[in-house]
Image (cartoon, grey):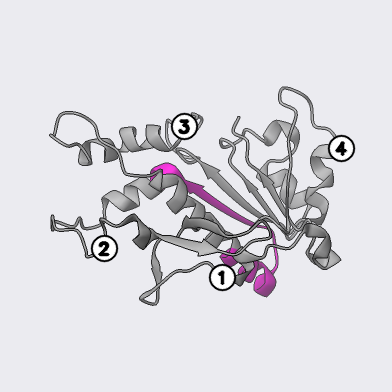
């Protein structure tokens, strides 16, 4: 949920400004989706952040990762599916490219970003220091392609019924029907917890929890 998060917009093509740093001063975690080194000109590169905000957790998400000849390129889920071979693996006839039924690289890498942030916070609490975590859509694609593929053509019971994948939650605006979270934990299906059904306004959170995560979503 976004209740204890704040987002920031950086002016592109300009020198670093004081406001570029003001929100990071009180944050525990900085999450961004910029290409590697794209934030350096704003004074928000890894070394500058470590010096200015010791103890900060920085989670970086990009299309191709920091290493390799494509490290400086832009990209998004569908492009990475095509370049990694997923499009051909999902081809209906071995000639025309196919696609996964959702933006799975975005979803999967997003979950990994959340896990990386939690793991980094735990390590920072135990050992101190500024923690950096880097994730990429291409790496997630590589991992997925290495997993065994199901060969059974018969869908599991209930797969053809869209209601199997939906749930209804209470909200301040009334009932909301949404998709169930994918996956399992300890062989139990995931569900939306009470916090998802009654998100508190930011002003109702304790001051110590307000604006502690800075999310910079834009891609440059």
Marks 4 and 2, how far apart at CA: 55 Å
Q: Earlier in the sequence, mark 3 or mark 2?
A: 3
- Name the element at disc 1: loop
Residue for badge 4: 18
Residue labelled with disc 1: 193
Q: Residue at x 27, y 49 (%)?
A: 145
**49 drawn magenta:** no
Q: Position of residue 58 (x, y in %)?
A: 64, 52
Give residue 158's mark: 2
Residue depicted at 53% across the width and 50% down the height: 134
Secondary structure beneath dot 2 equals: loop
Choose top left, top right, bottom left or bottom right for residue 206. Answer: bottom right
The image quadrant where one finds the C terminus is top right
Crowd rating for badge 4 (residues with CA inside 10 Å; few <14, some 14–19, many 20+): few
User: Is disc 3 in contact with disc 4, using a CB cutoff of under 8 Å?
Assistant: no
Q: CA distance from mark 3 to mark 2?
A: 35 Å
Residue 51 in the figure: left or right of residue 95: right
Q: Which residue in the protein does label 3 denote? A: 75
Q: Tell me if I can see residue 181 in this picture.
A: no
Residue 89 position within the rendered picture, expressed as x and y whole percent measured from the top left: 21, 41
> What residue span does the magenta drawing correspond to?
118-139
Chain-order first, disc 1 or disc 3? 3
């Amino acid at each position: 949920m976004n209740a204890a998060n704040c987002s920031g917009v950086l002016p592109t093509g300009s020198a670093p400004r004081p406001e570029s740093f003001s929100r990071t001063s009180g944050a525990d975690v900085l999450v961004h989706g910029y290409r590697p080194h794209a934030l350096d000109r704003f004074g928000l590169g890894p070394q500058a952040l470590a010096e200015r905000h010791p103890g900060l957790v920085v989670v970086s998400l990009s299309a191709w990762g920091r290493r390799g000849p494509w490290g400086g390129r832009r990209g998004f889920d569908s492009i990475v599916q095509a370049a990694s071979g997923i499009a051909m693996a999902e081809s209906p006839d071995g000639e025309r490219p196919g696609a996964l039924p959702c933006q799975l690289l975005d979803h999967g890498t997003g979950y990994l970003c959340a896990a990386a942030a939690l793991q980094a916070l735990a390590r920072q609490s135990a050992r101190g220091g500024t923690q950096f975590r880097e994730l990429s859509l291409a790496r997630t694609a590589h991992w997925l392609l290495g997993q065994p593929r199901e060969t059974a053509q018969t869908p599991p019971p209930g797969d053809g019924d869209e209601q199997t994948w939906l749930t209804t939650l209470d909200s301040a605006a009334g009932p909301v029907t949404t998709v169930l979270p994918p996956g399992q934990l300890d062989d139990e299906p995931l569900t939306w917890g009470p916090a998802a059904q009654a998100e508190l306004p930011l002003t109702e959170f304790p001051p110590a929890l307000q604006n502690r995560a800075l999310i910079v979503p834009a891609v440059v």
